[in-house]
Amino acid sequence: MKRQLISFSILFFLVVQISNAQEDKVEKSNIQTYTPSKLLNNGQWDIKWFNNLYTETKFADADGKSKSKLRENYFTSTLEAFTGISENNRINIGAIIEFRSNTIGDRQALSVFSLKDNPNTERKGITSFAPAIKFQPLKNVGNFSVQSAVHIPLVSNETENGVFLDQTAWTFQNRFFYDYTFSNGKWQLFTELNTEYNFGDEDSFANNTFLLAPGIFFSYFPNEKSTVLAFTQHSQRFGDFTQDYTALGLGGKYQITKTLNLEVLYSNFVRGTNNGLGQSFNLGIRALF
């Protein structure tokens, strides 16, 4: 009887441990598991609506000296949809579409949401579409992935009445993602290298230019459903036209439900050459199912 009781106790303990482990696995949030480096399972979907409002009141010249200017505002709303298509979960396909609304003439930052049409100080519209593929190049390195896309411009004129909307050059883009989660699970390092080649329209400011934009994000998870992060990003354009900038920022993410995540980011453009200097406010909603 004593031996049976001991056996039963051991069995009960193992069942409880397995059950707890399964619960922990289920409860682990998407913001911890599905970083941009992580690919989707076969048949899984990832839809993200990301909104960026950039407002600038300074411009850095070719020598890096900043000068005050009338406020300009640039709003970009990006809708991305990806799905897993391979049995080994190493290939995702998707599409990206962008809507922009820009205003000039020292109008307030929120003027980009105005429903009025003033062609002298504002422009808006769907500006580009991009088919995309995301893949895991190294079989045994699941936290490293590459996303390739060709951005097709949908605007005919970059600037009208002094208002810039979007570039008319095509863009071949490759983004390299890598993340590392520290052993305690509370800290995570995420890195990204964005590369672009712009081509196809001699009248575009970006034509025949290359872009390198590295970024480093350092996250802390106070609990499984939320994270706070700090980041730095740099962008360097070279070729027929050169410019660069460096930005620093803070943000956070929160898992609203098992499907929906909310993301909020703020960044400040602290330096640059041939580039505007301002602030960026970002809000994203992500659905994983």
Image: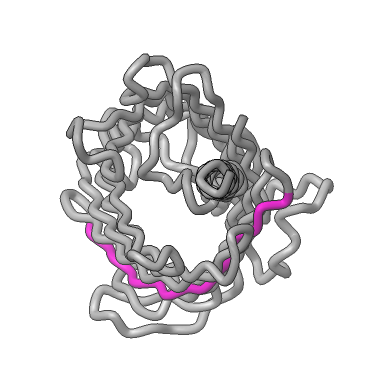
Q: Residue at x 18, y 34 (%)?
A: 138
Judged from this view, the residue extending furthest toward the right is 116
Residue drawn at x 33%, y 65% is 182
Image position of 153 (left or right of 46): left
Residue 62 in magenta stretch: no
Q: Nearer the viewer, residue 269 or 253?
A: 253
Quarter of the image that includes the N terminus: top right
Magenta residues (range): 242-256
Depth check, front residue: 288 or 234:
288
For the stretch drawn in magenta, the main secondary structure is: strand
Identify the colour scheme used: one colour
260 above or below 225?
Answer: above
Eyeballing the image, is 71 above or below 289?
Answer: below
**Residue drawn at 56 percent across, 65 percent down:** 227
Judging depth in this view, the residue of 177 and 150 nearest the camera is 177
Q: Position of residue 8 (x, y in %)?
A: 57, 42
The image quadrant of residue 74 is bottom right
Residue 187 position within the rendered picture, expressed as x and y whole percent measured from the top left? 41, 68
Q: Does 253 appear in magenta?
A: yes
